[in-house]
Image (cartoon, helix red, strand yellow):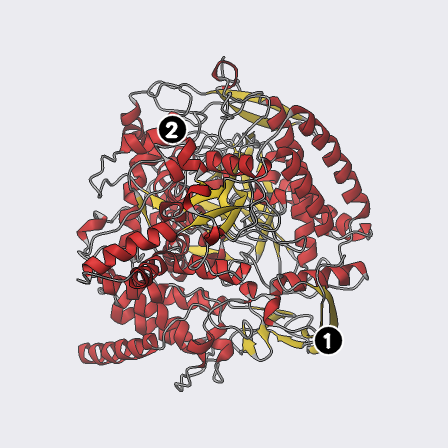
Amino acid sequence: MSHGNMNLTLKVWKQKNKDTKGRFETYQAKGISPDMSFLEMFDVVNEQLINEGKEPIAFDHDCREGICGMCSMYINGRPHGPKQGITTCQLHMRSFKDGDTIVVEPWRSAAFPVIKDLAVDRSSFDRIIAAGGFVSVNTGNAKDANNILINKDDADEAFNAAACIGCGACVAACKNSSAMLFVSAKVSQLALLPQGQIEKQDRVLNMVKQMDEEGFGNCTNTGACEAECPKAISLENIARMNREYSLATFAQNKIK
Amino acid sequence: MASSSKLNARIPEGKLEEKWTKYRSTVHLVNPANKRSLEVIVVGSGLAGASAAATLAEMGYKVKVFCFQDSPRRAHSIAAQGGVNAAKNYQNDGDSVYRLFYDTIKGGDYRAREANVHRLSEVSGNIIDQCVAQGVPFAREYGGTLSNRSFGGTQVQRTFYAAGQTGQQLLLGAYSALQRQVGMGAVQLLARHEMMDVVNIDGKCRGIIARDLVTGKLERHFGHAVLLCTGGYGNVFFLSTNAMGSNVTAAWKAHKKGAFFGNPCYTQIHPTCIPVSGDHQSKLTLMSESLRNDGRIWVPKKKDDNRKPNDIPEDERDYYLERRYPAFGNLVPRDVASRAAKERCDAGYGVGASKMAVYLDFAANTERYGKIQANKLGLHNPSKEEIIRLGKEVVKEKYGNLFDMYKQITDEDPYEMPMRIYPAVHYTMGGLWVDYNLMTTVPGLYALGEANFSDHGANRLGASALMQGLADGYFVIPYTIGDYLSEEIRTKAIPTDNEAFVKAEAEVQERITKLLSIKGTKSVDHFHKRLGKIMWDKCGMARNAQGLQTAITEIQQLKKEFWENVRVPGDANELNTELEKAHRVADFIELGELMCKDALHRNESCGGHFREEYQTPDGEALRDDDNFAYVAAWEYKGESQFELHKEELKYENIKLAQRNYA
């Protein structure tokens, strides 16, 4: 079945599971329409592989509207591909030219082991949130919402940090595999809001501790994370987290 | 009409507005020591699942959460855009619990249960309080209070929002609460696990069979109760606004093990989605209903008008919603707006290359916002360009992410020209039949959120799905589950070498082996697309008896072909996405048949169920309250065999009337 007139060569990372070695395989994507999303192009290639009796390429994806954070392809050396501010599922083939060769790899980080082909294990992010990325308020304890007044600018800034989709592009982009942008986005969101004040010291200390235990690297301020983040999460969050971390360390040492 | 003896909705006695308060205060409790030994399985981690799991764990129950995604934060609630309703009356515009209740019953075309909907309205305000306490960053006014906007089917502003990402923010709030419990060891999280079947022992649900999607291993899990929070089944149409993985498998397996399926034919077709652009398309993208606040919907007055939208003068445009429904205008409910768009396109007034689209135009409101902003900034004689520029900034703040998404997908700039939109499958009001406690017809098996049928009747109002998911999880199930679990405190955990677990696992294993051994010539997607086309053409926005009968035959044929000729590559003991899809599509095919049978038996039009044979002279849905004011609950009786049971809908507080939005 033909859809369009672009023909592409794909070099895709294939790896059976985390315990086996991977390698690049070359595939031809034929009859691709510029209106397809990058993942729809993969659908076409996979359909073709299945029809030929071969095994399709495994990749993570779900909502296909840029919000669930599940898709995770490293395309031509950049997480989520060549365009800024979007996820792989929102990348369209019109961003490529007929005849292009496209290299597709999984996220590369010790803290994100490969599960199969392009799918990686990002459960380390869940454990970081479990370490402190919350406000400890049981259901039923809340007072009327408008009793908490919040300055609009603070609310907007908290929202901008909360827009993180947890895809891990920041880690994939970083030469140190640092998760500082991800962690700082949650720390910032809650540090900016009155609801987050009570636990803010423990929160930042516990989340950073978990981040280190998961094997993420340190931040050396190259800013690749911000540049590649599909939701434009700002580096300022990292500065805010460092400030919160220093204050918390100082305060807690003094108490002890 | 009397309700079937097999259906007991357990609606408490007493006055409507006192039912929940009284019930909640008298329902059986489980003491804290006993809670620690009671195990609850939650399948699905969206708004309903995450909020239920977090709350039950806070109360002291032992909870296991399953999700097929790699993290609970990715459940499809994350994609909800516009907002969440609550009867707070913060805008002082006459809102109340009763008005939200009334709007929801009316919006559902008088096919929902009064008691459930009233309870939903009562707890709606608590949801906002809870979310704010968790740090959910809702939009705010300059004075620091929460902001609201309008949604369809209402005349008040009761929708709370966080830009066009409300679902994301609410889900991340619930996910945080869930992860807090995971961190404390109160919840065991099993991500990349899919539920394959429920396990019943002595007439009660006692656990599930799950597949570890990474290793392919089948696992047996015991629970004193099982909560299905697995969302809707819109993907039966192949193309929908659902996520690629959204599926009916959990609900369908429960159905085949004794849970009745309620109103399967009630499907919501959302009026404002980006139109289909080609046969490569894998999913459709919604443009939030909130855009209808500020966007005006129109088509050219002239047929086959090929001019660019901005070149068509004002008096040659047909703002057909404002024309037909002056009182609600662009904010009529979704079913009404969708049908009106279809009517214009079918009549030859559609726009774009396919002629199957209408315009959603922001020009007028961009200008209005620009003028307001200019006044705020103290600019007294702003130029037209200045006004437009300021207006675009306001529009960007409100809907920026949606406009960007539209541009990314269509390669057209919605700040410069109107969006082209068309209806698409979005939500399913039908689902597992549940009683007032949210329990299905299988004791111990519950369904929450979109997975149940209960609150939206035949059409859901915008911003009410988030409300229902969180109401069920945070504020309903924590109370109602006590009614059942208080009787279970003497039940010890059942070992999973029990024969019922062994048998259920063997059946799942057999099906996996079967799917892998067919080695046919057509991919799973091939069958899914064919099913989707049958459903969209014959059980979509408009249905008729003849089409539905044909569809049933075609689906039975498709099912036969699937089991003879599907090709599922790879092995069972590894990550195998084709195998996952094959299971889901096999269940969608069976569900599709039931949907058509339900649509065929309901000889009336109501809400999202529009039978062409039953319409008013103006083309509105024509209900038949004398014969169809009931919930259709279907019992599985064997392959292609379903028995209908009726739950009579009694309206004691609201008078049944023809919906009127004009």
Residue plotted at (52% across, 29% down): B441
Chain holding disc 2? B
- Amino acid type, residue under disc 1 in the picture: Glu
Residue B305: give x, y in percent of width and height.
56, 45
Determine whether the residue tagged by mark 1 lies in a helix, strand or loop: strand
Local crowd at mark 2 within 10 Å, few (<14), some, or many (≥20)?
few
Question: Does the residue at mark 1 contact the one at mark 2 (Cβ under 8 Å)?
Answer: no
Which residue occupies the foreground of this view, A55 or A200? A55
Residue B280: give x, y in percent of width and height.
67, 56
Which residue occupies the foreground of this view, A101 or B413? B413
Chain holding disc 1? A
Closest to the camera, between mark 1 and mark 2, is 2
- Determine whether B266 is above or below B283 in the image: above
Can the viewer see residue B575? no
Residue B133: give x, y in percent of width and height.
26, 54
Residue plotted at (54% across, 71% down): A80
In the figure, is residue B459 to the left or right of B157?
A: right
Residue plotted at (46% across, 26% down): B111
Residue A244: give x, y in percent of width and height.
26, 76
**Distance (Cα) linking label 1 and label 2:** 61 Å
In the figure, is residue B536 to the left or right of B90?
A: right
Give residue A25's mark: 1
Local crowd at mark 1 within 10 Å, few (<14), some, or many (≥20)?
few
Q: Are marks 1 and 2 on the same chain?
A: no
- Amino acid type, residue under disc 2 in the picture: Ala
Give residue A44's mark: none
- Determine whether B660 is above or below B252 in the image: above
In the figure, is residue B631 to the left or right of A31?
A: left
Quadrant housing the C terminus of chain B:
top left
**Disc 2 designates what residue?**
B662
Determine whether the residue tagged by mark 2 lies in a helix, strand or loop: loop
Residue plotted at (63% across, 64% down): A34
